Amino acid sequence: MHRPPKARIRQSFERAAPTYDSAAEIQRLICSQLGAALAPGFTPARLLDAGCGTGYALGLLQSRFPDAHTVALDFSPAMLRQIATPCCRLVGDLEHLPLASHSVDLYWSSLALQWCELPKALAEARRVLRSSGQLAIASLGPRTFHELRHAFAEVDAHQHTLGFHTPEEIGQFAQAAGFVAVDVKNSLKIAHYADFKSLLKAVKAIGANQIGDGRRTSLMSRNVFTRAEAAFETLRTPAGLPLTYDVVTLTAQP
């Protein structure tokens, strides 16, 4: 499954860093959901937030594990500069972690691995985890942003969302990387917006508008916008225009 070039991903999140928190309500809910999936009684000495973004999960993790040494790693230096929580900050690639083997007790990653070649990233997670450690990941499945695909289906031939792995594929990749006690769960989170323009603005604000090959490379014309807006309006609910996050959580042991 192809991903956007890494330089383009980094550029997108560099631009999104100042606006990310203002549009990340669903992302915060998913962090809380992933935290609830952690094994009770588990007390890591060193934890890694892989793809930490602006650091929302760090407060959650540090309140739960106050004695743990915390490492916050992200591909975007601008995202790391937004972090207010005291921690060790590292710029790094989840497919090539700048960490020693068997150096981490908890590998945590919420809504970052969908941007990676997942088998490579999971192999790296397995490498850096100690034998008594735990993997906890939240990623996205195929129903994510299906409303956008619907809106543009009859409008143009461009790709408007990333391709996403199924929960079954994610579990299989984890097992192939050497993880055991693999537990995969799937749920839907739906955000609502007053109008189509606000929805697109929110997607851009969290850096999720980079999708790789097949993307639109020019500005959207008024005609295209109007037709897509009309198609999206057919999905309107009393709460507003819906945008689905197909959340896949994975916990496992090395």
Image (cartoon, helix red, strand yellow):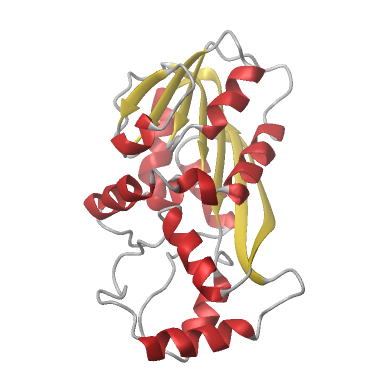
Query: In the rendered view, would you say 117 is above or below 56?
Result: below
At x 32% / y 50%, what residue is drawn? 15
Q: Give the camera-side residue of 134 and 245.
A: 245
Q: Quadrant of residue 36?
A: top right
Q: Quadrant of residue 101?
A: top left
Q: Position of residue 217 (x, y in %)?
A: 25, 74
At x 39% / y 37%, what residue is drawn? 123
Quadrant where the N terminus lies?
A: bottom left
Q: Position of residue 107 (x, y in %)?
A: 50, 28
Q: Position of residue 81 (x, y in %)?
A: 35, 30
Q: Give the camera-side residue of 2 and 88.
A: 88
Query: In the rendered view, would you say 235 is above or below 187?
Result: below
Work out whether residue 39 can be spotted: yes
Q: Give the camera-side residue of 111 and 107.
A: 111
Q: Quadrant of residue 211?
A: bottom left
At x 62% / y 27%, what residue is drawn? 60
Residue found at the very far left of the displayed protein: 7
Q: Give the camera-side residue of 232 and 210.
A: 232
Work out whether residue 164 can be spotted: no
Q: Position of residue 189 (x, y in %)?
A: 67, 57
Side of 238 relative to 34 (left or right): right
Query: In the rendered view, would you say 195 is above or below 81?
Result: below
Query: In the rendered view, would you say 20 is above or below 32?
Result: below
